[in-house]
Amino acid sequence: MMPPKAGYILAFVTPLILLAFSSFFLWVQTLNRNTWSSLALACGFFLYAVGMALHLPRWPQVLAPAIVISAVFYTAGCLALAEGILLRARQRFPRPVGLLLVILVPGAMYYYGYVEDSLAYRVCILNTALSFIFMVTTCKIWALRQGRPADRVLLCLLVLLSVHFVPRIIVTLMLAPWAENVPANLPIMVDAVFWITLQPFVGLTGAMLALSLLANAILDMRDELTAGQDMDPLTRLLNRRGFERKAASHFKPAARRPVSLILCDIDHFKSINDTFGHPAGDRVLAEFGALLRNSLRDTDILARVGGEEFIIMLPDEHREAALQVAERTRRHIEWSRPGDLPIGWRITASFGVVARLPGESWPELYARVDRLLYLAKQRGRNCCVTLHDQEQEQAPLPTLMQA
């Protein structure tokens, strides 16, 4: 029986749409070679399109093994899509689970295609496996619900994709008596009502997911470009521009949570450049930045804001906690040898520590901590200078206290 024109056209359109998106993601991969996520997505859409193409109407009867082969392409395609989505979130699909699915799903399709012919079981098994893949992916990136709008849209589409296989299973079970009478080597039910109904939904869901992933890939590249502009190339820390952008939310008028600031400067850094040359000085700066980064929490904001000057913002911390961090870091630096300098040379640093006053702006806070750092240099260097809390409330720059 020849399939109706609508089913025939729909059977061709969806694979072509998926192949087009596969090409788009290959193009995105050429623009951003720092990640493999776009390549995985391209492979995923390609493999899924091939799996659908194996069920196109009017294929010759010699392609009856497409039952098993298409299951391999469907499963591998969905696993590649899941891997590409997870790579964006710096996660991976569980390898043992993926390998098990690639083996078990085609095996089950072979059994219910050639040993015990059951179209209903084949449809249910394949759709259950694909739904499971996207459910696992959704669970692993559930934290995106708190991300940017594009990430939340992607998460919603993944939830939709996870559950959209369920109607296929339900309708298949409802039509199971009819489906059992369909020969295994007949092209899949392009003329069945539920197939014609669900096929556009497959294409629409896939297109929406692909567009969402493309939008997120473009936003990722924009963020990487912005991050490059905000990054100090030597230390791989934020520069002044990046620090001010990231710290801006803590200085909004409505911001009432405590914030402390630490400004530090490498002592006698010019003598290192003059004695050992600028390459040695660069190594000292890079390793000094790494020492600072390793001594902080993920929520702290660290940047290189001058030649040998570094700044640390500690959100939700009062002056006492910031002073402890500064003193611990100072002692760590004192006993380290950044840059592999000769024996007899050591690196020390001076620190200014302040807590933000109510309503204080960023320029005002930075001016205070900068003056404290200057006073730390005057007091002999290799020390931490801060203010008493009670004195902070009474005057902009009261008597100083050395840690």
Image (tube, grey):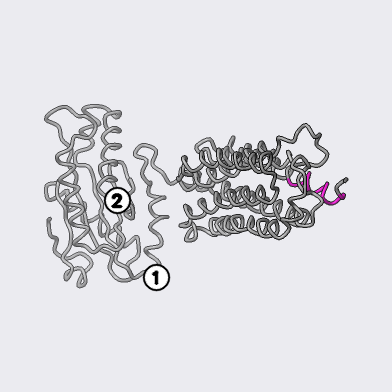
Residue 28 at x, y percent in the picture: 60, 40
* The C terminus - image quarter: bottom left
Task: Determine the main secondary structure of the stretch shown in magenta.
Answer: helix
Quick one: label 1 or label 2, which is nearer the N terminus? 1
Start-end of magenta stretch: 4-14
Q: Amino acid at mark 2?
A: Ile
Between residue 142 and residue 399, name the one nearer to us. 142
Q: Amino acid at mark 1?
A: Pro
Disc 2 residue crowd, few under 14, some 14–19, many 20+, Cα 10 Å: many
Distance between the Cα atoms at labels 1 and 2?
22 Å
Residue topped by disc 2: 311
Q: Which mark is residue 253?
A: 1
Residue 223 on the magenta span: no
Q: Secondary structure at mark 2?
A: strand
Residue 9 on the magenta span: yes
Between residue 277 and residue 204, name the one nearer to us. 204
